[in-house]
Image: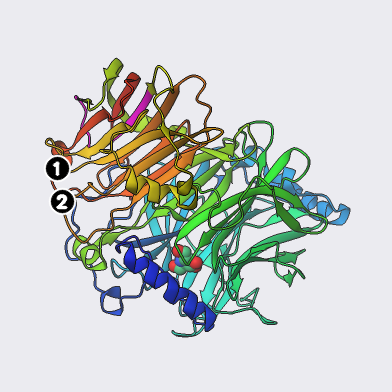
């Protein structure tokens, strides 16, 4: 139930969330997205260009939604029978000897990898419906070539829908997909877990997929709610068994059921879910993976042990945002315990405090990194999406690793994005007194990558943090303390997608407060003033930044792309993405400024801004 859908005013979501809880109470059937029957199969006549993205992934037209997965497999012909033969032997040996086959999956098999993006797609219209697994391939995660859909409803075990899932690379470099099939018509929407395998392993593009007749592999039983039972994870291998999670809920309790298998075909449900959390509602798209305690190197999903922490991320269907915890995974008892520094619930840490949902990570063995990829829905209405002929984008893939504090993750746009950088302009040492703003000229500001470091001489002028604000979230505080509300140190930052006379702009900024024992840094990406158009969802997205201010500097990177502003604060500690629809600040009429509305003078130490080229986009 995409109740929030980022399209409604704040009052309506509150009402709808209550309704949702009521439905859950009544054991109401859970769909997954808003359903507009009359629009579902209305093919786009025109595709409106004005707010389409230049370098963020999107198909040529129609609706996409998240829950993608990506795999990289060897493009080279080295999957020779010799390698395959030895890998199979190792795999069987590993099972016999109770060893992880993990090491078999690494190494040269990822030489010259191809990235596969599978995404939930409506081939017939610009709203959710008729969902298939569309398929695009890339060698750099930036330029994409479309292929035919990989999976679509055709068998009794998925004839009413092919919903989200994940891929696992089995030993011998053999990808296998697990996905949710819908087996009866609305409104029941009974969900089962199926698998699909490539028809031809020697085709590096894996164009054709087979859904064998022994599907489904996993069905709900013994009190599980079969209408809230979906989105199987990538499998991990430990102690002689594969494991997967399936997202679900029991009444209001969100949970990740755990299943085990020796052969990937016969799955047994573990007695306890891997983890669950009270009053969080349906958990969609769970994701569970290790991160290194030592450095930023990514790890294969099966790595366990002393040197890693685990991450459990869930997508909350009730509010349509995600949170993650960091914790310890105990493979022997198959339990995951979040650290006591990691809030497990609504106030948990988020990858992105803006429009970001149904994300997935995958291990990119070619570059030894873990990559996070999320979906951003539209913030306009379904009617407008139908007129535009499209809805939904993918944000930029991000590298993800553990912060040295061990208390949060860090994210940064993948390095390949920099290949799109074109002309560059710079500002150095520009002082901004209270009320000053300075234009960054010389690049098209509607499609740009901007990196800036601000400094301030002291923290003496910071505003006090009112203790009553502890009970409101960052977003609410940002709506009270917007970019035009004068502060002490801050608000300062960028005015993105701004019209020349500032009738429209999306400010991305910091504001520093002094709480009793420490400073609190608020980062906002505020859509309130982003468009003169009414009827759009224009939230003041915000999150706190847990950063050491000893050097009296704060950095910001914003990826600006026509209708999306994706911003990374303090080197990726806090990330916020906004979808916006300017009417004046479009194409060459978009401007970019740096600003300060605090009484303390702020210096733009360095600002580098690049125009961004268009990649090959489907
Ligand atoms: N969308 C899919 C579901 C998933 C949700 C259906 C996430 O499988 O739970 O399109 O947006």
Q: Is mark 2 within 8 Å of ligand 1?
A: no
Q: Report helix, strand or loop for mark 1.
A: loop
Q: Is residue 427 visible?
A: yes
Q: Which mark is residue 170?
A: none
Q: 77 or 396: which is nearer to us? A: 396
Label 2 to label 1, Cα distance in Å?
A: 7 Å
- Here the colouring is rainbow
Instruction: Locate residue 386: give its quadrant.
Output: bottom left
> For the point 57% across and 40% down, which residue is it?
409
Q: Is residue 143 left or right of residue 486?
A: right
Q: Residues within 10 Å of mark 2 (few under 14, many from 20)?
A: some
| Residue sitting at the far right | 97
| Residue sitting at the far top | 429
Placement of the N terminus among the 4 image quadrants = bottom left
> For the point 26% across and 67% down, which residue is it?
382
Q: Report helix, strand or loop for mark 2.
A: loop
Expressed as whole percent of the image width and height from the top left, the position of residue 329 reads: 74, 51
Instruction: Locate residue 248: give its quadrant.
Output: bottom right
Q: Is residue 447 magenta?
A: yes
Expressed as whole percent of the image width and height from the top left, the position of residue 421 reads: 33, 29
Tell me which segment is drawn in magenta.
Answer: 439-453
The residue singled out by tag 1 in the image is 503
Expressed as whole percent of the image width and height from the top left, the position of residue 256 reads: 64, 64
> For the point 39% across and 52% down, which residue is it?
355
Q: Considering only vertical position in the picture, is 489 above or below 544?
A: above
Q: Is residue 204 magenta?
A: no
Q: 367 or 10: which is nearer to us? A: 10
> For the point 49% across and 74% down, which residue is it?
21
Q: 403 or 243: which is nearer to us? A: 403
Q: CB of mark 2 within 8 Å of CB of mark 1?
A: yes
Q: Which mark is residue 532?
A: 2
């Amino acid at each position: 139930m995409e109740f929030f859908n980022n399209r409604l005013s704040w009052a309506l979501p509150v009402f709808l969330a209550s309704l949702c809880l009521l439905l859950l109470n009544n054991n109401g059937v859970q769909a997954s997205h808003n359903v507009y029957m009359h629009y579902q199969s209305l093919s786009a006549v025109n595709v409106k260009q004005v707010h389409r993205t230049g370098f963020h992934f999107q198909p040529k037209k129609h609706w996409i939604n998240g829950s993608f997965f990506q795999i990289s497999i060897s493009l080279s012909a080295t999957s020779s029978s010799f390698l395959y033969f030895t890998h199979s032997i190792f795999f069987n040996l590993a099972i016999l000897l109770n060893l992880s086959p993990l090491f078999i999956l690494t190494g040269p098999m990822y030489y010259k990898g191809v990235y596969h993006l599978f995404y939930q797609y409506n081939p017939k219209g610009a709203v959710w419906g008729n969902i298939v697994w569309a398929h695009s391939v890339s060698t750099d995660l930036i330029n994409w070539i479309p292929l035919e859909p990989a999976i679509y409803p055709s068998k009794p075990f998925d004839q009413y829908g092919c919903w989200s899932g994940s891929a696992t690379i089995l030993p011998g470099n053999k990808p296998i997909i697990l996905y949710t099939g819908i087996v009866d018509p609305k409104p029941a929407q009974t969900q089962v877990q199926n698998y699909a395998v490539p028809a031809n392993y020697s085709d590096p593009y894996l164009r054709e997929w087979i859904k064998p007749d022994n599907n489904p592999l996993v069905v709900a039983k013994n009190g599980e709610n079969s209408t809230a039972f979906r989105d199987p994870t990538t499998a991990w291998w430990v102690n002689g068994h594969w494991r997967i999670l399936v997202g679900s809920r029991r009444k209001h309790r969100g949970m990740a059921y755990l299943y085990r298998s020796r052969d990937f075909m016969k799955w047994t449900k573990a007695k306890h879910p891997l983890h669950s959390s009270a009053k969080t509602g349906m958990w969609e798209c769970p994701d569970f993976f290790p991160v290194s305690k030592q450095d930023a190197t990514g790890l294969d999903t099966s790595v366990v042990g002393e040197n890693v922490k685990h991450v459990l991320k869930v997508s909350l269907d009730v509010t349509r945002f995600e949170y993650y915890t960091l914790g310890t995974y105990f493979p022997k008892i198959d339990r995951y315990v979040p650290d006591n520094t990691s809030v497990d619930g609504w106030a948990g840490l988020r990858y992105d405090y803006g429009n970001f949902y149904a994300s997935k990570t995958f291990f990119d063995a070619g570059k030894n990194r873990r990559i996070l990829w999320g979906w951003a829905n539209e913030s306009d209405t379904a009617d407008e999406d139908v007129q535009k002929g499209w809805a939904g984008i993918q944000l930029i893939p991000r590298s993800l690793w553990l912060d040295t504090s061990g208390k949060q993750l860090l994210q940064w746009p993948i390095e390949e994005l920099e290949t799109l950088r074109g002309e560059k302009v710079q500002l150095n040492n520009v002082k901004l007194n209270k009320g000053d703003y300075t234009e960054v000229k010389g690049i098209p500001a509607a499609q740009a990558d901007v990196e800036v470091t601000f400094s301030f001489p002291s923290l003496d002028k910071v505003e006090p943090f009112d203790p009553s604000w502890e009970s409101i979230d960052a977003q609410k505080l940002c709506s009270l303390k917007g970019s035009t509300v004068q502060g002490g140190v801050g608000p300062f930052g960028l005015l993105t997608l701004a019209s020349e006379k500032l009738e429209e702009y999306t400010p991305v900024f910091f504001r520093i407060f002094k709480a009793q024992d420490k400073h609190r840094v608020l980062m906002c990406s505020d859509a309130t003033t982003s468009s003169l158009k009414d009827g759009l969802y224009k939230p003041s997205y915000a999150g706190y930044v847990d950063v050491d201010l000893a050097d009296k500097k704060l950095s910001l990177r914003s990826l600006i792309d026509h209708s999306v502003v994706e911003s990374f604060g303090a080197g990726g500690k806090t990330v916020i993405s906004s979808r916006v629809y300017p009417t004046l600040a479009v194409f060459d009429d978009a401007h970019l400024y740096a600003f300060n509305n605090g009484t303390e003078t702020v210096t733009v130490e360095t600002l580098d801004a690049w125009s961004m080229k268009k990649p090959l986009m489907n």
